[in-house]
Image (tube, grey):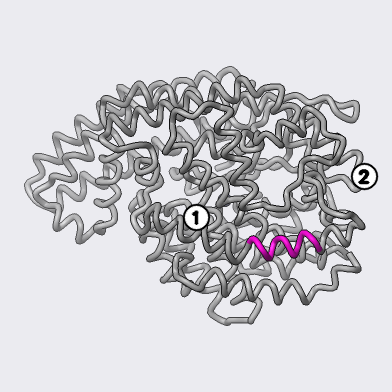
Amino acid sequence: MKFHEMPYRRVTTEQVKEFCDSFILSFTSAPDAETAERELRRMFAFSLEVDTQTSLCFTRHSIDTRDAFYSEEMAHYDEQGPLMQLSLQKANDVVLGSPYRKDLEHSIGTLYFRKLENEKRQFSEAIIPDLQEENRLTTEYGKLLGGAELHFDGKTLNLSQMMPYRTSADRNVRREANAAYFGWFSDHRETLDRIYDALVRTRDTMAKKLGFANFIELGYIRMERMDYDAAQVKVYRDEVKRYLVPLVTELNKRQAARLGLDHLVYYDVDYLFKTGNPHPIGTPEELVEKARAMYHKLGAGEFFDYMADNELLDLVAKPGKETGGYCTAFPTYKAPFIFANFSGTKDDVDVLTHEAGHALQMYLSMREIDVPAYISPTYESCEIHSMSMELITSSKMEPFFGAETEKFRYMQLVDILRFIPYGCLVDEFQHEVYANPDWTPAELFTKWRELERQYMPDLIYDDGLMSQEDSYLERGGRWQRQTHIYERPFYYIDYTLAQVCAMQFYLRFDAKDPAAWSDYLNLCKLGGSRTFLGLVEAAGLKSPFEPGVMRDAVEKFRVKLAAFDDSRF
Ligand code: ZN
């Protein structure tokens, strides 16, 4: 079925309650384990349909946030979602307390029950108003950013459409575009401060109502982290500071030398080469066709045809569309969906590989796995699929970048190494914020800037022509553009953990390891049937928390990067 043909029907609270009530009745009166399992599978089918409908609503809303119908539907779920959760929680409670639990654990797996227990810990009727408030606030933030209109280069542009200007070969354009981009945030600072302050307070209140000291522990539970805790994450971040940050400093120096600059200013960082960043060749439609050919060669052609032929790719930036990119799925149709904002930059190709990695996993898992809770793993595992795909396809980029392919490959590795410290910065910042929920906006800014100096010691905002916008950054405002900080607390470290896994896949592909592709596909098929560290092990990778893994990866990448003759770029 094509995307536009998929019917949308609102899921109502009454519907969910009615289903859960009938489930509770039949499940608790099941005379044997077999009947109980049959009932549980009826619950699985229902939850797939609910996921499909909410996902359709979310997707259509993000494609055009101005669409009144889907805006109203989103408001409905923001408001009613927590009430639906209440009914589902009651149903989950009877599953957890089932006299046939041992048999069910045997046929469904114990992880399912651990997930239910995890859900139970993060929810109670008392926090429903707070969950509703949290939803309203994150929606407000998304709408604010999605509706941004910047006047630049004689055009009205949204935030995503500023990207080509922000990485322009002309340093003045770069400077002005970044000033306009961050100027928009600076102009909306009061609203951005208000939304975040309310979010932090709401989350802190929820945590306390549920019996936690603060939101940090609850945040980890919401991220379904069963393998590791905040103390291990801190050790990992410290390894990043110790081994990786110095390598990034070396790369920054190399870049400044290439560009003929004394040092990089913040708007130079994403402009890597004197001859310009690599640009993909072709229209969005042509890029999709190139991607199709590439995935056929890789052995995932059937998957990509399915995506392209069923309108499951919405790639072009347009007014009213939310910023960023994501992959979701409509499980009733076993259909993944990719959302992006093409901007004519290298990012377009990154989306076609990154989100396609997510989509391939969902495509395979939805066909292999019959327990909905096992289709997608936790986020740090999901990002292994996507970030590895970016690197796996690195050797197949000639059709996209032609003569600029080597430049693309170099940039890809630099981007990865730069990203990890930034991701850890976002993570440490959030730990600080939720440990200190009473901080004022000014205190948040100060802490951000202080951490920025640890993770990105070379970052310079003041170019001697400091404008109001630059001083917003200098004071510590940059985090306000990072949607995850508002929308998905504690998510960000996941990207970096996955990146360390993806780097290992890259090194294996690079060394022509014959098991690398089958291990990757196997990892995708496993979906969420194991926890993070279980999946990492199944894929033949080392845990990012294992001592020495970071240092080893950094050393190998240092050697790879040294082999590029970037003076030609
Ligand atoms: Zn991703």
Mark 2–mark 1 distance (CA, rounded to whole Å): 37 Å
Which residue is at 26% across, 59% downward?
A: 109
* Extent of the magenta region: 245-253
Q: Give the secondary structure at mark 2.
A: loop
Q: Is residue 37 left or right of residue 196?
A: left
Which residue is at the front of the view, 117 or 344?
A: 117
Q: Is residue 391 left or right of residue 100?
A: right
- Residue 29 falls in which quadrant of the image? top left
Counting from the top left corner in percent of width and height, residue 522 is at: 47, 68
Counting from the top left corner in percent of width and height, residue 378 is at: 43, 52
Q: Earlier in the sequence, mark 2 or mark 1?
A: 2
Q: Is residue 247 magenta?
A: yes
Q: Which mark is residue 170?
A: 2
Which residue is at 81% across, 68% downward?
A: 406
Reading the image, the residue beneath label 1 is: 382
Q: Which mark is residue 347?
A: none
Which residue is at the front of the view, 507 or 268?
A: 268
